[in-house]
Amino acid sequence: MEDIKPFLRLISQDPVGSQNLDVDLRVFADWLDEDHPGTPVRWAHTPGWLCRAWWDLRTANPKLRDFGQQYQLIGPLVATEISSMLMAHHCPWLDHYGSTTIAGIPAFVSEPYCDILACLKECNLFRSCFKPEIVPAFQNYSEWGCGTRRIILFHAAAALTPSSMERAPAIVSAVG
């Protein structure tokens, strides 16, 4: 099993709305489908790191305060607010959502009925809203089943920290 962090780092550096981001997301989706198909999901669970990222986003952007009640960081309410924001931007709402771990990295997933273009649009929206806290991705197949795709939000602090394999050469060269 390969380390997915280099892929996530590449996606996090692509400009929002760029053709590079769309291509990198598609390539990463194909790779995830082969190496990490349908990881189990803790259904209807919104992880704390996503709640905090949503709170920070809402605090910084007054337009987003319309999507929910202030001072609410309760997971299901955060998911409802994020879903409302997505629908306002004509993206698939959060459907069959929850938390999972993919290649050792905590992630939040939504498995809506949508096509690849809708996935790309949603990933670009998440990227523009939540940068740098979250790295979005998608998979062509989901655990939920036929007709759904998996939108993935990786926790950037975990996803972009160099793995021990990536750090090893730097440590050796610093000592040597």
Image: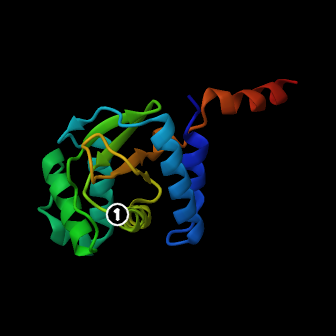
Q: Residue at the spot x=20%, y=47% of the render?
A: 96
- In percent of width and height, residue 48 lies at 27, 41
Q: Residue furthest front?
A: 146
* Depicted 104 relative to depicted 52: above or below: above
Q: Residue at the spot x=32%, y=57% of the render?
A: 56
In the image, 66 versus 94, the foreground residue is 94
- Specify whether 152 is left or right of 92: right
In the image, 170 versus 143, the foreground residue is 143
- Specify whether 27 is left or right of 130: right
Q: Residue at the spot x=56%, y=53% of the render?
A: 27
* Depicted 115 relative to depicted 96: above or below: below
Q: Residue at the spot x=28%, y=52% of the render?
A: 148
- Specify whether 143 is left or right of 125: left
Q: Amino acid at mark 1?
A: Asp
* Depicted 85 relative to depicted 43: above or below: below
Q: Within 10 Å of the Cα at label 1, are there few (<14), some (14-19), or many (20+) other Cα atoms?
A: few
Which residue is tagged 1?
Answer: 115
Quadrant where the image shows the N terminus? top right
- In percent of width and height, residue 113 lies at 25, 58
Quadrant where the image shows the C terminus? top right
Q: The residue tagged with tag 1: helix, strand or loop?
A: loop
- In percent of width and height, residue 33 lies at 46, 42
Q: Residue furthest right?
A: 176
